[in-house]
Every structure is written in C-alpha cells, then in structure tokens.
Image (spheres, grey):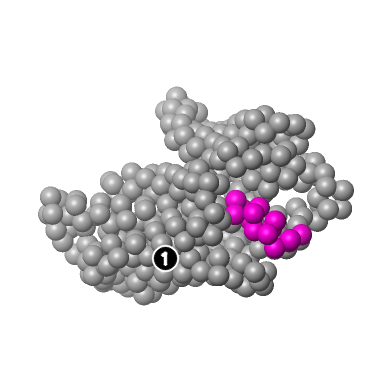
Amino acid sequence: MIAKYVLSPLDRWPFVWRVVFLCCIANLINAADRVIMPIAIIPISDHFKWDLHQHGWILSAFSVGYMSSMILGGSAAKRYGGALVLTAAVLLWSVSSFITPWFAHSTSALVLLRFTLGVGEGIGLPTIVHIFSQIVPIDERSRALGYLIACGSFGQILATLICPHLYWGASFYLFGGFGFLWLIYWLWVFRDVQQRERVEEDFFIQQARLSKPTLHWYEFLSHWPLWAIYIAHFSMNWSNYIVMQWLPTYLARFLGAGKNEIMFTAMPYLSNCVASIAAGHIADHFIKRQWSVLAVRRLMSCIGLIGPGLLLFLFSASTSVSAAISIISLSMTLSAFNSAGHLSNHVEVAPNHAGITFAISNTLATIPGILCGPMTAELVITSGGRWFPVFLLAGCVNLVGAVVYGSQSSSLQVL
C-alpha cells in the first residue's frame, strides 16, 4: 500500500500539513541563513580590515558547499530516508551559522564554516522535495511546494529587515538558534515520517522490479533543449547572485547607504516573491488562450532574462540609494518570470525525470555563486573601484542566456 492511503483523509491531513509546515519553516531558516553574511560582512570587514578579495572568497565559499551537496542530498534521502537526512542537514547548517561569530577573526575558518553551511543547505531542499513526494498526496503537492518557495522568499525578507539592526554576531546566533528550536519540534514527527517513507519505499521497490532499466547519465547532457534550460538557469543565477552577495556592500560602500537604507534591500526579494505567483497565473492564462507551451516558455524566459539584463546596465548608472533599490526591485520582479519559463520547462522535456534534470540544472546554476565573489572583487579593484564592469558582465550573461534559450529550447519530450 502507498503511504497516503494508510490513514483516512481526516487522520492524514493534520499529519501531512504538520510536516509541510515544519519543512516550510526549515526552508525559511535555510534562506535566511544564506543572506546574513552578505549583510554582516560589512561591519565584519570594517572590524578586521578585510580587503575585497577576502570578502569575495568568504561569500563564494557558501556556493561551493551548496553546489557540491545538492545531488548528494537527493541520493542520501532516497537511500537513508528524508527524515534522517533533513535532521542532519538542519543540524549541520545551524551549528555552522551559530558558531560563525566565534571564528570571525580567521578568514580561513570563516571560509570553512561558509562551506559547511552551504553543504547543509544544499542537502536541505532536495531532501524536503523527496519528503513531499513520499507523504504529500499528489493533489496537494502543488500547494505544498508553493508554500515552500514562498517561505524561502519570506526568510530572505525577514533576515534582510532584522539583521541590519542587530550586532552582527547576534544575527548568526538568532537564526542558528531558530534551527536548533526547529529540530526540537521536528522530533515530534520524526518517527511518523520515517514509517511513512518506509511504506512508500516498499511500494516503489515492487514497482521498480516490474519496470525496465532507466536512462544513462550521459543522456541528461546530450540534448540541446536540456542545455538551453541549463544555460538559461545559469544566466539567471549570475545576476541573482550578484544581487544576493553584493547589493548590501555596493549600497554601503559605493552609494553611502546607512543601516536603515540597507534594510530596504528586502524589497527586491518581496517583489520577486509576488511576481513569481503572478507569472504562473499569466503563463497559465496564455496557454488556456491557445498559445503554444513553447511560445509561453520562451516569452516568460525572455522577459526574465532580457529585462533584468537591460536594467543592470541602468543600475550601474544610478547615483542614489532609492533609485538603485527601485531598479533592482524591478529587475527581480522581471526575473521572477523565469519561474514560468525555463524553470517550468523541465516537465515538458523530461516529464519522467524532471527531478534529476532540475538537480543538474540547479547544480550548474550554482557555479555563478562561486565565481561572482572573487570575480566581482577583481573587477572592482582592477577598474579603480568602479562597479560598472560587474553589472555590464552580468547583463551580457543574461542576454546570452536569452538568445540560447530562445533559439534552442523545446516543449517536446527528449527523455
């Protein structure tokens, strides 16, 4: 029997949505933890007299850990159970965050802690998706995933609003402590989640014995429509990582923003969250109006890549904090249209393997997070403190992604 039929709907609903709620809170903490350092690094750099190169490597270390663990997280959850793996992931990232102030005097120690934070958080999201696939009924998964993504955006907003007003070390203690508190509540449902996963696993083992062998790994890298998605995702994340890692520093160092103005860097995340929901409704409306799926995916992706690319050129010329935040908020609003573009295209080109293609795409799209830290520092230093080359490069990467996706994408199944 499949797990979702073990209990009656009336008995099942509270359990399922308790788990969904806790997973959403875990993703909120996950997202909040990753934006603390880009804000806190400003006072930390002032205190320890770091240069931009040290600044960049500390920020990029997170992305190295994050990229290295995403596929590992999905595989581990399948092998050992999502409940156990998620527990380990939250414990790892919470400890890494909580003890960060103790090692802030050492650049190498901070790089290591940022790496372990990335490893834990990289495991988190694919593990949560695995748990949802095991215990959440099919007709409730869209809502569950919608809440999951929304809570991630809310976590970024929350951290951006709170952290500028705290002593920098307190931010790490606060959200690291939230992780420990989450673990206490998670233990209440831990055994039930494990039991539900075991029932599902037994079912799928029986199904696998009746099915034929699946695809080889190289097939996920041998189709142009898949590479169109991968490149578009990479391009989108290049500008997104620039915003997430460097916006507070740019506003403070280049435009002279104070603590109260840094707080308004929450606006791009808020606009992105709202626009993601709107983009989905707009895309569905066009498809219902008999637009082809491919035309809708290409339109949404072009809006989400070309729009932010052009706005980044404009952003580089802004001379006030309010203008800069307004432009970046509009850029992130348009970037949200990618959610109804190439990010949704996985289901059409690989309907039976969308989870794997998304993991590959997300892994490749984390490379900009690694490159943006040291590369941004180098560009700013070699250009005499000017940031224009940084935003020019990001805008050009976006435009290349739009051209590749617009010419090579497909809505036909390739896997």
Q: Is residue 47 visible?
A: yes
Residue 22 in the figure: left or right of residue 381: left
| Residue kind at label 1, given as amino acid type | Val
Residue 318 position by quadrant: top right
Residue 167 in the image: above or below residue 317: below
**Image position of 223 with respect to 217: above or below:** above
Q: Which secondary structure lies at badge 1?
A: helix
The percent position of residue 114, horizontal first and vertical second, equals 58, 66
| Drawn side of residue 233 relative to residue 22, left or right | right
Measuring from the top left, give residue 90's x and y in whole percent: 42, 65
Residue 166 locus on image (x, y percent): 52, 51
Of 360 and 314, the residue lying toward us: 314
Specify the farthest residue to the top: 289
Q: Which residue is at a point 33% across and 48% down the rendered structure image?
A: 144
Identify the residue at image location x=56%, y=34%: 333
Relative to 227, is 200 above or below?
below
Q: Is residue 40 within the magenta segment?
A: yes
Residue 332 appears at what percent x and percent y?
58, 37
Residue matched to label 1: 90
The majority secondary structure of the magenta stretch comes to helix
Who is closer to the viewer here, 320 or 13?
Answer: 320
Q: Residues within 10 Å of mark 1 (few under 14, many from 20)?
A: many
Q: Is residue 180 left or right of residue 273?
A: left
Q: Is residue 88 magenta?
A: no
Which range of residues does the magenta coloring cover?
38-51
Which quarter of the figure has residue 111? bottom right
> At x 64% / y 58%, what residue is drawn?
44
Identify which residue, 378 or 310, lies in the foreground.
378
Total count of labels:
1
Residue 236 in view:
no
Is 402 on the left-hand or right-hand side of 93? Answer: right
